[in-house]
Image (cartoon, grey):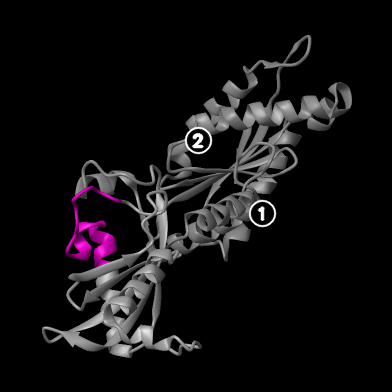
């Protein structure tokens, strides 16, 4: 530390230097830990804001495992080992759910929702009791992380219906195609299209059309399995991805879905509107070169259903 002052002799006094360093660390926005290679905490200093970090009165954890989950502990210790091996700083992101923290530290105060932290782990060039040491700088990055999640959600979600959008559906189909190729697992898709949707818009207006889309979206979401994925591909077209099920095992359920949609009564200003949908149903097979091959087959089946009278499903 270089001191630009004629009173620099004051810093020669250890007690004064200790006070200055203590003041500096108390003003730091991050919390810091000196930790040895086995995860024992030698000391901590820095930020003590309860809105940023968890605190418990008269509780001073002596190991990493005492203040975070088993999974986080495993990742932190592995990163400490890597930092010491490479003699370099490594950045690690972790998250803490309040229920996990409560198990470790009852009567805790601090954030009440899940928190994300950025850990910067840097090796020190001295040891304690013959054990290597690192300094860990911990910063609460929850606000930044929530913004990232919101942006990601917006990029993958249809703003009107709150269903996944075409981009997400394409990514999910890719993942399922890879799963099919590797494990030969059954994966079925159902493509749906609202019948005479243009006529609804032309007759009742686009607000009514939006109401139809939203009502149908809620109904579809409430009538699929938890493991299924539903997306609005655009306009009045929807896609449901159903893993671990073959067409012959789901066809009857899909036909019931089509019938139940026809029984929906969608409230408009002074009337109730009934709609129908047509669908194409198919599953990945050995003859498919890629996921687009299946989508084309299902799309053809959908339009055959429309040509054959609508309000029905055709098998691809």
Q: Residue at x 56, y 61 (%)?
A: 288
- Magenta-drawn segment: 55-75
The residue identified by callout 1 is 296
In the image, residue 173 sits, relative to residue 217, either above or below, namely below
Q: Residue at x 43, y 61 (%)?
A: 179
| Quarter of the view holding residue 273 | top right
Lower sequence index among marks 1 and 2 = 2
Residue 188 placed where, x, y %?
Answer: 50, 47
Asked whether residue 56 is drawn in magenta, I would say yes
Element type at mark 1? helix
Element type at mark 2? helix
Q: Nearer the viewer, residue 247 or 21?
A: 21
Instruction: Tell whether 257 sits left or right of 71.
Output: right
Disc on res. 161: none
Residue 104 placed where, x, y %?
Answer: 20, 50
Q: Residue at x 39, y 46 (%)?
A: 111
Residue 176 placed where, x, y %?
Answer: 48, 57
């Amino acid at each position: 530390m270089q001191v630009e002052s004629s009173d620099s002799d004051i810093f020669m006094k250890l007690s004064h230097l200790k006070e200055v360093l203590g003041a500096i660390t108390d003003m730091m926005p991050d919390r810091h830990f000196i930790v040895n290679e086995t995860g024992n905490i030698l000391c901590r200093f820095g930020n003590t804001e309860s809105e940023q970090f968890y605190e418990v009165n008269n509780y001073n954890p002596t190991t990493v495992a005492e203040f975070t989950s088993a999974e986080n502990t495993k990742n932190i210790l592995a990163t400490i080992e890597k930092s010491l091996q490479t003699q370099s700083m490594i950045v690690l992101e972790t998250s803490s759910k309040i229920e996990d923290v409560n198990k470790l530290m009852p009567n805790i105060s601090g954030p009440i929702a899940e928190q994300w932290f950025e850990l910067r782990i840097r090796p020190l060039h001295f040891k304690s009791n013959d054990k290597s040491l690192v300094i860990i700088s911990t910063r609460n990055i929850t606000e930044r992380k929530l913004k990232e999640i919101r942006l990601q959600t917006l990029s993958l979600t249809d703003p009107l219906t709150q269903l996944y959008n075409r981009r997400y559906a394409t990514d999910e189909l890719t993942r399922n195609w890879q799963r099919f190729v590797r494990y030969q697992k059954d994966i079925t898709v159902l493509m749906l299209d609202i019948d005479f949707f243009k006529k609804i818009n032309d007759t009742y207006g686009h607000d009514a059309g939006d109401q139809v889309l939203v009502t149908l979206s809620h109904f579809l979401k409430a009538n699929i399995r938890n493991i299924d994925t539903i997306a609005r591909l655009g306009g009045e077209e929807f896609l449901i991805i159903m893993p671990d099920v073959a067409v012959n095992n789901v066809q009857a359920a899909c036909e019931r879905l089509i019938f139940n949609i026809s029984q929906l009564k969608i409230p408009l200003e002074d009337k109730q509107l009934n709609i129908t949908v047509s669908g194409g149903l198919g599953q990945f097979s050995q003859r498919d070169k890629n996921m687009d091959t299946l989508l084309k087959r299902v799309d053809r089946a959908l339009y055959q259903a429309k040509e054959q009278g609508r309000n029905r499903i055709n098998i691809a």
